[in-house]
Image: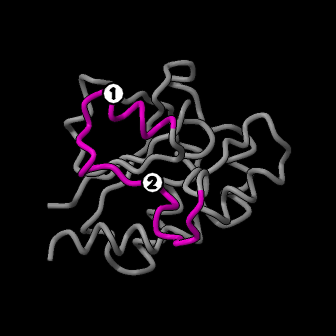
Amino acid sequence: MAKKVLLVCLGNICRSPLAEVVMRACAIEQQVDSKLFFSSAGTGDWHIGRGADQRSAAIAKQHGLDLSSHRAQQVHGNNWSNWHWFVAMDHQNYTDLLRMGVPRSRLLFMRQFEGNGGEGVLDVPDPYYGGASGFEDVYQMLQDNAEKVIAHLLAQDE
């Protein structure tokens, strides 16, 4: 059975949907996609049912990824137990998941394996109010970390 991994940001229209398609593409490239199932959700309910932010969709498309079928959903205390792992985009998302009852042992930061150290380095910044370059920067962060997160998730079977 595939491990179910939920990528989490605030509204599920920018970072986490992009992380979902990046992680899925990386798993396919590594030929481990049968072992991991990826989805995404937000901790907030503002965008439930909406598609991905147009800027995230455009960045995805520039990199050969498709966000056209994405519809925002929310993770909350009633549905978190459906997932094996949670990958938070930032400290606030991580804290929100803990408050919902998600065990710390099932939580990761998207950037936690970079090894740079320092406060804030673990956050994937929210590009929503920034310019288009912020979305490309987020894509690069996700791309740079996807393989490391997948390696960690797969190592949990050993």
Q: Amino acid at mark 2?
A: Phe
Residue, x 73% and y 43% (percent of image)?
127
Where does the magenta region start and end?
Answer: 92-118
Instruction: Provide residue 146's location: percent of width, then percent of height.
Output: 49, 68
Instruction: Provide residue 96's location: percent of width, then percent of height.
Output: 41, 30
Residue, x 44% and y 63% (percent of image)?
24
**Mark pair 1, 2: CA separation:** 16 Å
Front-lying residue, 50 or 12: 12
Front-lying residue, 53 or 155: 155
Residue, x 68% and y 37% (percent of image)?
53
Q: Earlier in the sequence, mark 1 or mark 2?
A: 1
Instruction: Provide residue 12's location: percent of width, then percent of height.
Output: 53, 35
Mark 1 crowd level (few <14, some 14–19, many ≥20, 10 Å Cα): few
Residue reaching furthest to the top: 46
Quadrant (top left, top right, bottom left, bottom right) of the N terminus: bottom left
Residue reaching furthest to the front: 118
Q: Which residue is mark 1?
A: 99
Asked if labels 2 and 1 touch by Cβ distance under 8 angstroms, the answer is no
